[in-house]
Amino acid sequence: MCGIVGYIGKNEAKNVLIDGLAKLEYRGYDSAGISVLNNKITTVKAKGQLANLVKKSKDFNLEGNIGIGHTRWATHGEPSDLNSHPHLTENKKISVVHNGIIENYEELREELKNKGKKFVSQTDTEVVPHLIETFYEGNLLDAVIKATKRIEGSYALGVICEDEPDTVVAVRKDSPLIVGLGDGENFIASDIPAILKHTKDVYLLNDKEFVVLEKDKVTLFDENKNEIKKDVYKVTFDDTAAQKGGFDHFMLKEIYEQPKAIKDTLAGRVIPKERIVLDNIDKDAFQNIERIFIVACGTAYHAGLIGKNAIERLSGVPVDVDIASEFRYRNPILTKNTLVMVISQSGETADTLAALRLSKERGCKTFAITNVVGSSVSREADYVLYTHAGPEIAVASTKAYITQLVALYTFALYLAQDRNYIEREKIESIKEELLTLSDKVEKSLENSKISKEIAQKIHKETDIFYLGRGMDYAVAMEGSLKLKEISYIHSEPYAGGELKHGPIALIENGTVVICLNTNKELRGKMDSNIKEVVTRGAYIVGVIPESYTDNLETYNTIIRIPDTDPILSPVASVVPLQLIAYYVAIEKDCNVDKPRNLAKSVTVE
Ligand code: F6R
């Protein structure tokens, strides 16, 4: 969702801001704007793509070395030039960019209107500059501290003030914000890729930490204005990780990065004949755990469904999987022996974070699987297992999902090694198999031509079904989600045995059904389910292991995947589904990396 960049230093702020905003485009946005301070604040805002802002900027004098910029994903007020950020005071002396939601904005707006403040937009954010102005007595930091005491909700703020031309003030609460430390220049941003071209040294801010950014100095304060010290975090990836690297789209690049991401996520944790070690997690941490809840949204939720299967089968611990936005409101039964595991690529998803907080309040142990170091879930959970997918830029998650699966298998085996639920030899054989997954995904990718041909055949369909049993069903859900989010084709996943309870009524001559049939134990039943739709005229695409030779005539097209233990099969079987979605979207000329209406990091509930 919204992206923030702020700059002070030796270079033209405009260029740094626009370049940084371009790196945050992946978060999803519908308008953008910048303010540059040079004696006076000059602000330019434009609805639509960043290119519109760049074009419009040419008509303004935006010279200056200090500024703030923003990409907006509309929540309060339609996407428009007026509603875009930055928002300013009437005299244009204070300018603010904001990511998050001010929950009490209506009350504040009334109060400020009664004090004579004039509002020009429909946004919640516009109360912030006015509020800061009412508290301003010659010190911007003081005014921002006072203003945040009145604000309820979530915010990452970047603020500049005409009367303080050498400072950017920033703060975060429940919305991401980092500080980039340069040489004679400093930055704020919603995410690391925005500043990576300039520096790899960052401060990862905690909630209610205030930043005073100057050209040669960054000072951090708590809400009582006590100065705080923080370790510098060294970013381990470089600018090229957030570039397309010769691929047409980030999504395709990220699909092809999966073998490496799997290896990186297993490295140092899963080693043949050795105990699995989880970073900074005590050997006995989960000894008393009797039940696990996995809580997540979207693709991460789909990974959780596979995690449930793996954890229950390998360790015998019962697992429930919940959609985060539902979990909080169903009053889940949580005890001190419950482990709540949240899964989140970004680590900032509002519902997932809220579920984590609820679980902590109820006294459970909490565990986060996340891809972003220093993200909110990583800071708030008792235990963290990082996926090492590297920055995921395409809105549709691929490499983060596959590394979530790998992290979940690793965790399941970690629990299994002390629970005596399955034999030691079985644990060892799955571990060894886990270490072959990177090569198996590589092999699945070599088959990409078939996925492309299938996409050419099916891209004009209006409804596509995905079918599977057991773990294949969870993969079917993910394949179906990928297709709908980037190609806008309506699609439904079903459990093989469920079709005849209603949805089979939708199958007619030529309906495309993508069938996953990877598990030997379920194959007989799944073959029957496939025949049920074949009889009704469906066009069948099968995703099946190399060794499977029966009933091949049932399929119109076959995609082969490498054989593996059925518990691990999702890692290889999801790859052709990702590729089908990608190539269908290409055939339909869709905006693959930035599908309509979607945001990469969903920081509102
Ligand atoms: C789909 C997708 C979303 C995210 C979901 C949760 O491709 O990316 O469904 O999985 O919004 O996001 P995170 O994992 O950041 O919590």
Image (spheres, rainbow, N blue to C red):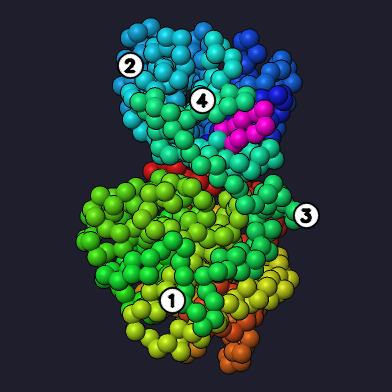
* Nearer the observer, 214 or 433: 214
| Disc sitting over residue 246 in the figure | 3
Which residue is under mark 4? 212
Q: Nearer the viewer, mark 2 or mark 3?
A: 3
Q: Does the magenta portion include 186?
A: yes
At 55% from the left and 72% from the top, the residue drawn is: 571
Query: Which of the marked residues, 2 or 4, is nearer the chain's N terminus?
Result: 2
- Whether residue 186 is visible here, answered yes or no, is yes
Q: Nearer the viewer, mark 3 or mark 1?
A: 1
Q: Amino acid at mark 1?
A: Leu
Q: Quadrant of residue 541?
A: bottom right
Q: Nearer the viewer, mark 4 or mark 1?
A: 4
Crowdedness of circle 1 by 10 Å Cα count: few (<14), some, many (20+)?
many
Where is residue 442? Give x, y as percent: 68, 73
Q: Amino acid at mark 3?
A: Gly
Query: Which of the marked residues, 1 or 2, is nearer the chain's N terminus?
Result: 2
Query: Which of the marked residues, 3 or 1, is nearer the chain's N terminus?
Result: 3
Q: Amino acid at mark 4?
A: Val
Q: Nearer the viewer, mark 3 or mark 4?
A: 4
Distance from Cα at disc 2 to Cα at disc 4: 30 Å
Distance from Cα at disc 4 to Cα at disc 1: 46 Å
* Image position of 245 (left or right of 358): right
| Disc sitting over residue 110 in the figure | 2
* Nearer the observer, 550 or 193: 193
Residue lying furthest bottom: 550
Which residue is under mark 1? 413
Magenta stretch bounds: 180-189
Q: Amino acid at mark 2?
A: Glu
